[in-house]
Amino acid sequence: MKTNITVLGLFLLICAAGVAEGKNSMVVTEPVESFAVMIDMVLPGTPEDVFEAITGDVSGWWVITSSEEPITLQVDAFPGGKFLETWYENGTGYQHAVVTKVDYGRRLQFEGLKILAPEALTMTTTWSLNKTEENQTMVTLEIHGICPTGIGVPETVESKWDYLLNGSLRPFLEAGGQQDDIMQNDQTASGDQPSDKTFQFTIKAEIPGSPNEVFDTATGDISGWWDHTFAENPKALTVDPFPGGAFMEIFDDEGNGVRHAVVTAADRGKILRYEGPLGLAGNALFMVTTWTFAEMASNTTLVTIEVHASGEVEDGWAAIIEGVWEHFLNDGLKAYRQAGHE
């Protein structure tokens, strides 16, 4: 087994944007590295069979737990759901991960799973399921993360996933979804990865309307002006205007979709902040987007958007992302408000 690792030659600064005055930044100043692990294997069953085995009740094959005898091990099959281990009837337990993307029978993505590597700073796990021969599925598992340098986190993560997939999930599926004796095989492959970088930028625009009115247009249903989506015609595209809410794209009536970001700060007419990779989901990328709203003359609001990002960043991404945000702010939100929409 082999894992590709890119080590930063200097301290990686993971900077969350401060409040409007630029204070309260979060900085991690220990040497870190990003890693990417890819595991390919063919498992018995259709993609739908495998998807149902890795969601819902996973206690039949998931054997790495915080408690010796948890009463539930559940992976929600919808964006914003949880990978939850419950220890007692009163609900005491541990949230292992947050589900960020779901496409039934095709893809599942979650962020977290520090139980596999407590030292990891971030970790995103993506399952891709593709039908091969009759009643078989090609499973590609990609794990991207950031961790302290030189302590073997990538190798540990790869080893534990190999154990879970080959030694537990495979025999579980071969037994028709029943617990079986644990067997172990090695079928892993390493994945290439982007380099580690940080970037930040600030853009501004004068938008028609009061700060409260512009804030309301930038939250709630944003499908009228936000035009970059995963689905061609998503059923819903919303940003919750409260801390702990989400920037969600729902694909269809079944609830398949993706959580683009988590809202971490919201004060109507003043500030909106969310953390998440937006269109770059699946990469070990920590990105913070902060909106501030300042009242100007003639019922106009100065909107300032600051973006701070760190982690797996390909060359050219920073300029592309800044250009897309210029488009959202001017061609999207500003033009939408100028056309009389609220």
Image (cartoon, rainbow, N blue to C red):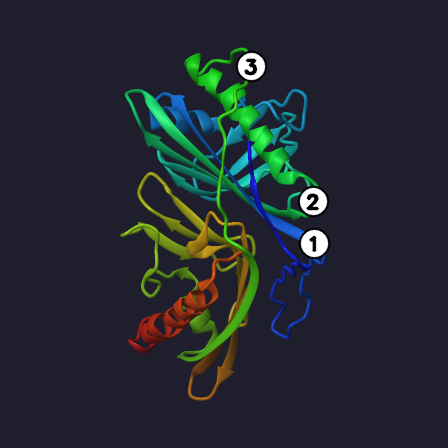
The answer to whether the residue labelled 3 contacts the one labelled 2, judged by CB atoms less than 8 Å apart, is no
**Residue annotated with mark 2:** 150
SS category of the residue bearing label 3: loop
Foreground pick, 45 / 333: 45
Residue 8, compared with residue 138, is above or below; it is below
Query: Would you say 209 lies left or right of 262 here?
Result: left
Lower position in the chain sequence, tag 1 or tag 3: 1
Residue at 44% across, 24% down:
53
Residues at marks 2 and 1 touching, judged by CB atoms closer than 8 Å: yes
Direction right: furthest residue: 30
Q: Mark 3 points at which residue?
A: 182
Three-letter amino acid code of the residue under disc 1: Pro
Crowd class of label 2 (few under 14; some 14 to 19; many from 20; radius 10 Å) = few
Q: Residue type at mark 2: give it.
A: Gly
Label whose residue precedes the other's in the sequence (3 or 2): 2
**Rendered-image quadrant of the N terminus:** top right
Q: Which mark is residue 31?
A: 1
Real-space Cα distance between discs 2 and 1?
9 Å
Q: Circle 2 — which element? A: loop
Tell which residue pokes out farthest to the bottom in this image. 297
Q: Which of 9 and 222 is in front in this view?
A: 9
